[in-house]
Image (cartoon, rainbow, N blue to C red):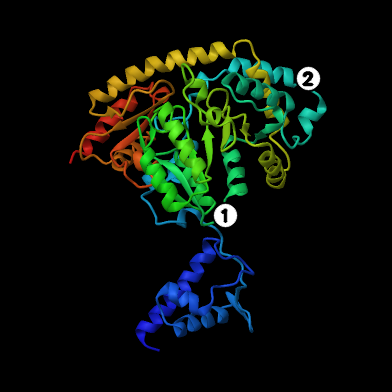
Amino acid sequence: MTNRMATRTVEVMDAIRQRMADRRLSPGDRLPSIRRFATAMGVSPSTVVEAYDRLAADGVIRSRPGSGFYVSGALPPLALAEAEPRRDRAIDPFWVSRQSLDADAGMLKPGCGWLPADWMPNAALRRALRRLAHADDSVLADYGSTRGSPALRRLLARQFAEEGIAAGAEQILLTGSGTQAIDLICRFLLRPGDAVLVDDPCYFNFQALLRAHQVRIVGVPYTQNGPDTALFAAALAEHRPRLYITNSALHNPTGATMSPQTAHRLLKAAAAHDVTIVEDDIFAGFEPDPSPRLAVLDGLSQVIRIGSFSKTLSASVRCGYLAARPEWVEALVDLQVATNFGGPSPVAAELVLATLGDGGHRKHLDGLRLRLARLRRETADRLVAIGLQPWLMPRGGFYLWCSLPDGRDAAAVARAALDEQVVLAPGNVFSVGQSAAGFLRFNVAQMGDPRVFEVLKRAVAAEEP
C-alpha cells in the first residue's frame, strides 16, 4: 500500500470514528455503502474497503454478508469539551460557568448571571419554609406529579391570560428548571445533526446545551431591535433549522428588547419554514412594562414559552415551566417521566407558589426594578470612565453589554482579572461566530465592591495594544 493510500485509509477510519463519537452512528447502525462513502470522502472504493476491514479487525464494526457493515462496538464517552475545536478556556461556556458557580466567598463575580443572595425575597422564602414544615407528608416525601403542582400551573395560566395568552393549566408543564425545559424540548424535537438557530451573541448555556444534543448551531447577528431579520430569513432557507431559541425581552447578554416589527417578521418567516421558536422569558419580571412577546403574538402555535423563577425568587429553589400546544405537552410529559420520573420537587413548587402569592412579592419586584435602574446608570458611567462603552442602555434587567477600547481582547482582560479573583464574562463566550472578542457582559448588581473597577481598570490598561 502506498503512503498516500495509507493516509487516506486512516482519514476514512477517523471519519467513521468521529461519526460514532458525535452519536451520528450508534451500535447497530448500518454504515454508508462502500461506493457512496468513497464518493463522499473523495477516495477510491478500495480505500474504503481497506478502512472498513481494519475497523472490523479492531472490533469497531462488523460485516453482515450481503447486507453491509454495521457498528458493533460501544460508543466512546461523550466529552462535550471535545465536541468541537478546543477554545481558549477563558471563552469556553463550560469554563466560565464553572468559574461563576464554584467561586468561593472571596471572589467577585461581575460576570455571573444572577443577583446577589441578599437581593432576593429571603424573608418571604423563610415564611414559606415555616409554613411548609406543616405541609402534608406527601409534599415532603412523595415524588412530584407528572405535570407539577396544579395550583402553581393555575397561577401561571392566570398570569398568561393577563398578557393575552389563552392557555389553560393543562398546557403548562412544570420542570426542574428553565434549562431542563429546553432540554426536554431538544429531546422531543431534535436529532443529532439537526440545525438550530440562536442569536449571535446569545446566552452561552444555550450553546452548551445544544452541544450536548450534538446539533449544528447557527448564529444570526443580533441588533438593538432583535435578530437581523434579513439574515434570519437567509439562515432559514440555507440551513433548514428545526428550532430557533431566543430571549425576546431583555435579551441576554445585550439587554436589548425586540421591536414589534422584528417580532412580526420573525414569526412570519418561521411559519413559512415550519420552524419552532423557543422563547425564554426568564427576565420578564425586570421589565418596567411588557414588550412584544412572540408567544403572545403567536398564541403558542409555533412558539413554546419557557421560564423559571431563579432570577427573581431563588436560584436554590429549582423550578421552571414550559407552555406549548396541548399535544406537545402530552409528549413532553412522557419525556419528563422518562428522564426525571415526574415533575419538579413538590417542596420546590410549594415554596414558589407560596412566595409568588406572598403579599409583598409585587412590591419586591418594583423595588428590584428601581434599584437596578439606578445601578445601570451609575455602573455605565463608571465603565465609560475607564474606557468601556455600553452597546445600549437596557430598559430593565441587570446586564450591560460593553465594548472595550479599540484593540483590547476581552479574553485576555478576563484572564488578568481572574488572577485577581474577579470573574468576568468575555464576549466570545456568547458568540457562535466568535465575533465579540471586544465585548464584556457586566452584571451591575454584582459590582458593588469598588475592587471590581480597580481590577478592571488594571486589566484593561495591561491589554493596551
* Quadrant (top left/top right/bottom left/bottom right) for the N terminus: bottom left
State whether residue 258 appears in this view.
no
Amino acid type at circle 1 is: Arg
Inter-mark Cα distance, 2 to 1: 45 Å
Q: Tell which of 8 and 107 is nearer to you.
A: 8
The answer to whether 461 is drawn above or below residue 274 in the figure is above
SS at badge 2 = loop
* Marked residue nearer the N-terminal end (2 or 1): 2
Question: Dividing the picture into quarters, in which one does residue 404 lie?
Answer: top left
Left or right of 172, for residue 456: left
Query: Which residue does the image show at 51% across and 65% down from the upper left?
Result: 19
Which numbered circle lies on residue 191? 1
Mark 2 nearby-residue class (10 Å; few <14, some 14–19, many ≥20)? few
Query: Which residue does the image show at 68% across and 34% down from the upper left?
Result: 344
Which numbered circle lies on residue 134? 2
Query: Which residue does the image show at 54% across and 20% down from the upper left?
Result: 120
Q: Tell which of 146 and 416 is nearer to you.
A: 146
SS at badge 1 = loop
Question: Dividing the picture into quarters, in which one does residue 42 lie?
Answer: bottom left
Left or right of 113, for residue 455: left
Percent of width and height locating residue 154: 70, 23
Left or right of 153, for residue 69: left
* Quadrant (top left/top right/bottom left/bottom right) for the C terminus: top left
Q: How many marks?
A: 2
Percent of width and height locating residue 80: 50, 53
